[in-house]
Image (cartoon, rainbow, N blue to C red):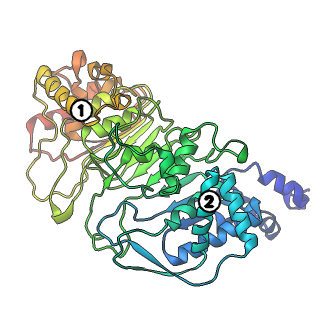
Amino acid sequence: MAQLTDLPTEIILHIVSYLQSYDDIAALAAQSSHLYESCDMRARARFREIHITNNAKHLESAFAALIDILEQPYLGRYVRHIEYWESVTKTYKDPTFCELNTSSPAEEHMRMIRAAIYRAGFPSNIIERLAMIVRLISGVNSRREINLMNRPPLLAQVLTALLISVAPEVESMALSQPFLSKFSVPWHTDSIDRKCMKFPLQWLLHQINNNDAFPGARGPKLLRKLRDVYLVTEPEDDSPWKQDRVFFMTDLFGFLELFHRLPSIESFGTDELKTSVVGKHGLPFASSNISCIQIEHSLADSMNLARMICLCKQLREFQCPIGARSIGGNLTCRLNTFRIIFQALLVHRRTLEVLDLGVTYIPFDSKPVERVPLNLSENREKREQMQLIQIANEMALADKSVQLPDWIWDQAGSLADFSALKHLDQELQYLLYMSRGVGTARDDGYQLVDRLPPQLEHLLINEYVRNENVEFDEQVDSP
């Protein structure tokens, strides 16, 4: 009986080319040593994930990977995940300085690097300057912290940008914010083109996401298969802030603007999210292909969460447990109005399948906390909501494109209207608020059991302690 291992290597490689999953290829390769060699598993394992920071060892490893890919371009197809971390946005550490040796790449390598920069789509007038930064990377011996007024070239940024340009099969990325958070006002904002040299990774990602013609005839379109993006907010391992759960200001929407329109993008995730008054205040309504949002801890306010929910064309999964400790252990979690988030979720009532909106801070006492005022009148709720929306729109200044349509705040609905919802993990008060409903769907005499979604398969109620609230006990116990 003929076996797969009897096939010529060329046929085996043709079969492997149809396997998109690394795990599927690894399972096939495990059948025999011949298949293992034919599938080139050693090289696949080496190039599968590339980690890039300003650590000298990471720079050396990533630079070697880039040179190998430039010499043998097929190796770029083995790269499925890229991680980038650089303290561009952190203010608590001094700038980083490079100690360099006198060696430099061979001229043959420099020619390949210049060609790669050109194919990636960078403007011709900065190709040589970027190439010189790459030349610096090859000579990094060590990095140390000293007091300097100006930062050196962003070595990890340039290297990450070039690796993205030669890795057409990348499926996921985890990266820190590749630009500084700045006040963004319509009359004083640098164009993205002016940031090409200052933050080359930001420039490249912005062009890929927002310019359908990029990079034109120079090379193939990039990040066509990228599905998952994760915003890294953690400090460095040796940071004095590492032990506390610290929330650094993040230009959330400025970051999402680098990925939200990619054709295969599906999910966005992060941890310890705290949005800032600096940077972008949102993205246009229903402008993103992202359908899954996973946030581990969040101190973002209601309006920022609503804008994140509403930038999705179709939202299937939203996980955002709210709260954590900040510096000094102070409890800093409370949504200013849950109604804003609920009505944003109602936009996706026919597509949302997973909703996890609990509370994950560490309590400092056992006193019950009112997270959602359940007994306010409809008129008062609406009035308080619109005041907050007006303030949020004023904060966005003249950028009308990020203001959500008014019809969102006129929606009526309850938990029962989420026709596709299968998995629900929620804090009790949020659950009861959604069950009661808003607008004409509000029913103050509701029963929780009668308002559950029709397709619900899993329900987990958090933050509920029996005998602390009679009304809550009656709702949970209702048949």
Three-letter code, disc 1: Glu
Three-letter code, disc 2: Leu
Q: Nearer the viewer, residue 246 or 435?
A: 246
Give x and y (percent) for residue 341.
Answer: 28, 34
Q: Quadrant of the N terminus?
A: bottom right
Q: Is residue 128 above or below residue 281?
A: below
Q: Is residue 271 above or below residue 152?
A: above
Hey, which quadrant is residue 30 in on the image?
A: bottom right
Hey, which quadrant is residue 361 in on the image?
A: bottom left
Q: Secondary structure at mark 2?
A: helix
Q: Is residue 57 above or below residue 474?
A: below
Q: Is residue 16 above or below residue 154?
A: above
Q: Residue at x 65, y 57 (%)?
A: 117
- Count neighbours of disc 2 (C-alpha within 10 A) and say few if under 14, some if 14 to 19, many if 20 or more: many
Instruction: Give the residue number, with chain letter if any, for mark 2.
Output: 162
Q: Quadrant of the C terminus?
A: top left
Dot 2 or dot 1: first in sequence order is: 2
Left or right of residue 176, residue 50 in this image:
right
Q: Secondary structure at mark 1?
A: helix
Hey, which quadrant is residue 63 in on the image?
A: bottom right
Mark carried by residue 394: 1
Query: In whole angstroms, how far apart are the C-alphas of marks 2 and 1?
Result: 39 Å
Q: Is residue 219 visible?
A: no
Instruction: Single out the residue that lies furthest toward the top.
Output: 440
Q: Residue at x 11, y 34 (%)?
A: 471
Give x and y (percent) for residue 78.
Answer: 69, 59
Q: Nearer the viewer, residue 253 or 477?
A: 253
Give x and y (percent) for residue 160.
Answer: 56, 61
